[in-house]
Every structure is written in C-alpha cells, then in structure tokens.
Image (cartoon, rainbow, N blue to C red):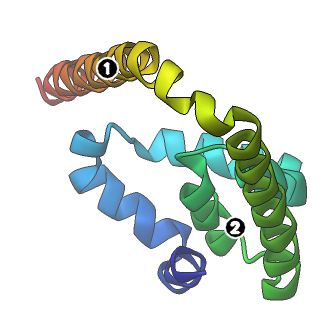
Amino acid sequence: MLWYYVARRIGKDRLARWIDGHGAWLTITPRDLDHVDDWFERWGTFAVLGCRLIPGLRTLISIPAGFSDMATGKFSFFTAIGTVAWTTLLAGVGWWLGNNYGDLAGPLSWVSTIVIAGLFLCWLTRVIQQRQSRRAVSQ
C-alpha cells in the first residue's frame, strides 16, 4: 500500500521527470514508464492480481496502480486475493517439500547463483546501453 500511495501522490508526470534525470542506474527510461502505463491500462485489475504472484513484481505493481488512479478499494481487493493465493502457494510448496529441502538446497544454490549473475549482467548491459544512447543524443 505504501508504494501505491506514494505513486498516487507523486503522479506519472513527476515520476517521469525523476526517471529522466536519475533512472539510468535503475535502467528505466520515461519511455519504459509509458509502456508500463499502456500495459497497465489494458490489464488493470488482472495485472495487480497476476503480479502479486510474481516475486519482484509483487511490490512494483503498486506503482502503476497508484499513478493510474486505480480506486483504492479495487486495488486493495485484488491485492488481497493475489497475496492470499501467493501465501497459499508458498505454504503448499513448503508442505510438499517437507523434509526433502536438505536434498534440494545444494543443487538449488547453484541455480540461484546463476540467476543472480544473469540478472546482474542484464542490468549492467542495460546501464551501458543507456549511457551510450545518452551520449549519442547529446552529441
């Protein structure tokens, strides 16, 4: 709810100006914000519900919901449904894994390391591309 209210108070235009000046390290451009806004306008409530089930997007979906002025009650309702579904899924997976977690922890640690390294490389590549793009525009 915090990010929803922050985005609602700040608004898309103010956020776009901030992103234009400081978004490079987050690898976000005002154009990306427009894409998110268009996507959210199309999917709205389904976006809130679906993104509550995806780690990393669980928090971020609150921002377009806030700056699109989605009704607070509607946002809260679909957030609650998505959060209950996510919590139920995690509890179910935890119950299913039971005592087998120790057997899976070793192999999964390698997967986690590869995923984190891959995400870092994607971020670094995007930062470099944005810097090159800004230099080309300013010349």
Which residue shows up at 23% across the image and 27% down it? 127
Mark 2 = which residue?
65
| Disc 2 element | helix
Residue 38 visible to an observer of this rendering? yes
Residue 95 appears at what percent x and percent y?
74, 45
Looking at the rendered structure, the kind of residue marked 2 is Ala
Q: Disc 1 and disc 2: Cα gap in Å?
A: 32 Å
Above/below status of 4 relative to 27: below
In the picture, measured across the screen, residue 95 lies left or right of residue 136, that is right
Residue 40 appears at what percent x and percent y?
75, 52
Q: Label for residue 139?
A: none
Above/below status of 12 relative to 60: below
Which residue shows up at 27% across the image and 24% down it? 120
108 or 24: nearer the viewer: 108
78 or 37: nearer the viewer: 78
Above/below status of 1 relative to 111: below
Q: Quadrant of residue 87?
A: bottom right
Mark 1 = which residue?
113
